[in-house]
Amino acid sequence: MTFGQYMVLFLQVIIITFFLPIAFFYLLRTFGKIDSIMLSDLSHRKIPLVLHICLLSVLIQKSITADLFPSLHYFFMGGIISAAVAFLLLYTKIKASIHMIGISALTVFAIGLSLKNELNTVSLVAFLVVLNGLVASSRLVMKAHTNKELLIGFLCGVLPQVGLLYYWL
């Protein structure tokens, strides 16, 4: 792939994982489907999680295919699984920390990349582990989650990524 193709891919990822979710947030807030960015009400989390699953599905079907980018493909596939688990947990009245899902999944992905490419990324992994702690601490300080919700979020992020490592390592 050329540099231009990588830039187009990067823009697609940014648009689908950042700009569209922000636009959907304001749209949902305008229509009264969510009340704040905190999504403290369990029912308010359902639509954003389904939208997230749909957006990631489009991304891995159209841009980040397993034959072109296996590492990223399975990373985003793990993200879909994590979001689906978090969505299903809502029906049992269990709230998983979406922040912890994201940072813990990224940590496992970084570890997987370092194993696959045989790189020494100890400082990056250590930074991400500290970031996991900071994210968890901030969610507790803001009273957005309990310890149980943080642990559930952590496991929802880690387990799918670990399970999918086999397919791209």
Image (cartoon, rainbow, N blue to C red):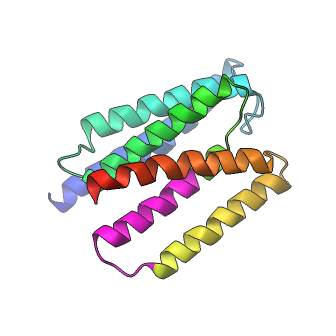
**Residue closest to the eye, 54 or 121:** 121
Examine the structure image and report whether residue 120 is included in the region drawn in magenta.
yes
Quick check: can you spot residue 143? yes
Report the side of 153 relative to 64 (left or right): right
Q: Is residue 162 above or below residue 131?
A: above
Residue 167 position in % (x across, y down): 28, 51
Q: Residue at x 59, y 35 (%)?
A: 86
Magenta part of the protein: which range? Answer: 102-121
Q: Residue at x 52, y 53 (%)?
A: 158
Q: Residue at x 50, y 49 (%)?
A: 159
> What main secondary structure does the magenta stretch of the protein show?
helix
Residue 147 position in % (x across, y down): 78, 51
In which quadrant is the C terminus drawn?
bottom left
Q: Is residue 64 above or below residue 42?
A: below
Q: Residue furthest left?
A: 1
**Residue closest to the eye, 165 or 135:** 165
Q: Is residue 66 above or below residue 1?
A: above
In which quadrant is the N terminus drawn?
bottom left
Residue 85 position in % (x across, y down): 55, 34
